[in-house]
Amino acid sequence: MKTLVKTHSGPRTLVSRLLTTLLSLTFNSQVALAAPQVATSWTHSVFLKSDGSVWTSGSNSHGQLASSPTTEQLLPTEATDLAGIIAVSTGHNHSLFLNADGFVWAAGHNGSEQLGRLQTADIHHPSAVISGVRSIAAGGQHSLFLKRDGSAWSAGDNTYGQLGRDSTITQNAAEPIESLTGVTSVSAGDAHSLFLKSDGTVWASGNNSSGQLGDGTFTDRPAPVPVLNGVIAISAGYRHSLFLKGDGSVWATGDNTYGQLGDGTEEDRSTPVCIATNISSISAGVYHSLLLDHDGFVWASGSNTFGQLGSGDTTDSSVPNRIETLQGIHSIAAGYGHSIFHKNDGSVWSVGRNFYGELGDGSEESKLQPTRAQVELPLPEVLSRN
């Protein structure tokens, strides 16, 4: 396998391409044109089509697939209660859906009130949570909402201060994080949160036991602290974080038990270290990381217990290695023990753990090589041209 070599950054990043698409949303009388998306977590996966329909597979133990009854789905199945969706996000056992009108719908586990509802019962059918939103992020037991005015809101478990409100009190309804303004992106880990501001600075709060906040300490932070600048994309994993800078370089911090930081060691880091360049997109999973380069190739590091690195074996890697069997990749999503890849031709491929059908290939058999999922996500013309 090839080891990732640092080179100069290439053309426009995937982030800017997606932004162009979302700013170019076109409407008919029923639906908005969405950028196709894949979101995956511990045991379930969500697929968003450009027509605004949502398809789900995997575990449905808490109703996280936005369908009833709560039985697992081996094949991606349409969540018929949802329409006009433009973004999706998956937490441990809950899911968030954002529609074109700025309303967020939530389904799944609500034991920590992460759905932003004044109850702790699971929700099996999508329920409206908050309005005026442009971006969403589902974490382990908490949720983040970015409003159109640049304010960040949060709900759910706050044991470590991951809600960013300078307290550790769990919140059963979404409330604003008063100390943050000008936020352009949010990402939620297991018990930590990342916030990207319009000036390219990253702020972080919550659990910092492995250094995942990247502030140079291992101290939990109930209020957001500054971490890094020059950043254009963020991704919070279980207990590690990835940051993509405007020059195409990737920086990593936090838990490195399995080499998921990709720095060639298995030492935790409390300060971000540069691990790669020429990258257009990042995805931090539970114990592994995925990087997409400007040439459409995927690089993976970390735990490979279930074959989630796509290398054809189960050997962990502390450096990013290229998945030789994949090319022409448009977007990536790292879960617990599995990975999902969306190709430019609209096909979806997945690899790794498949105990509940999270790979979406119609089986419960884990895979060591990327296998085609039974769902198609054709790219809209406006995005396929870029």
Image: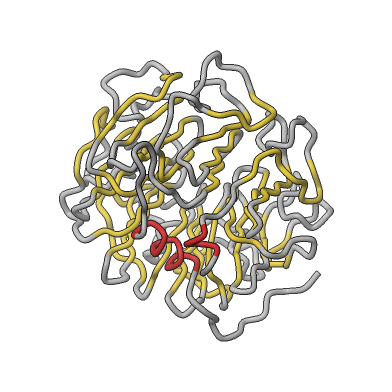
- Of residue 272 and residue 34, the one placed in the foreground of this image is 34
Residue at horizontal 46 percent and vertical 31 percent from the top: 94
Image quarter hosting the N terminus: bottom right
State the colouring used for the structure image. Answer: secondary structure
Q: Residue furthest right?
A: 313
Q: Residue furthest bottom?
A: 8
- Of residue 100 and residue 357, the one placed in the foreground of this image is 100
How many circles with numbers are drawn on the protein? 0
Q: Residue furthest left?
A: 178
As drawn, 99 above or below 106: below
- How far across and how far down the image is residue 26, in percent? 36, 52
Residue at horizontal 62 percent and vertical 66 percent from the top: 262
- How far across and how far down the image is residue 260, in percent? 62, 59
Residue at horizontal 51 percent and vertical 42 percent from the top: 48
As drawn, 81 above or below 29: above
Residue 232, by quadrant, is bottom left
Q: Is residue 194 left or right of residue 316?
A: left
- How far across and how far down the image is residue 108, in percent? 45, 25
As drawn, 380 above or below 170: below
Residue 296, by quadrant, is bottom right
- Of residue 163 and residue 79, the one placed in the foreground of this image is 79
Residue 82, by quadrant, is top left
Q: Is residue 346 left or right of residue 180?
A: right
As drawn, 19 above or below 278: above
- How far across and how far down the image is residue 9, in percent? 53, 82
Q: Residue furthest front?
A: 29
Residue at horizontal 45 percent and vertical 42 percent from the top: 89
- Of residue 51 and residue 239, the one placed in the foreground of this image is 51
Q: Is residue 3 left or right of residue 207?
A: right
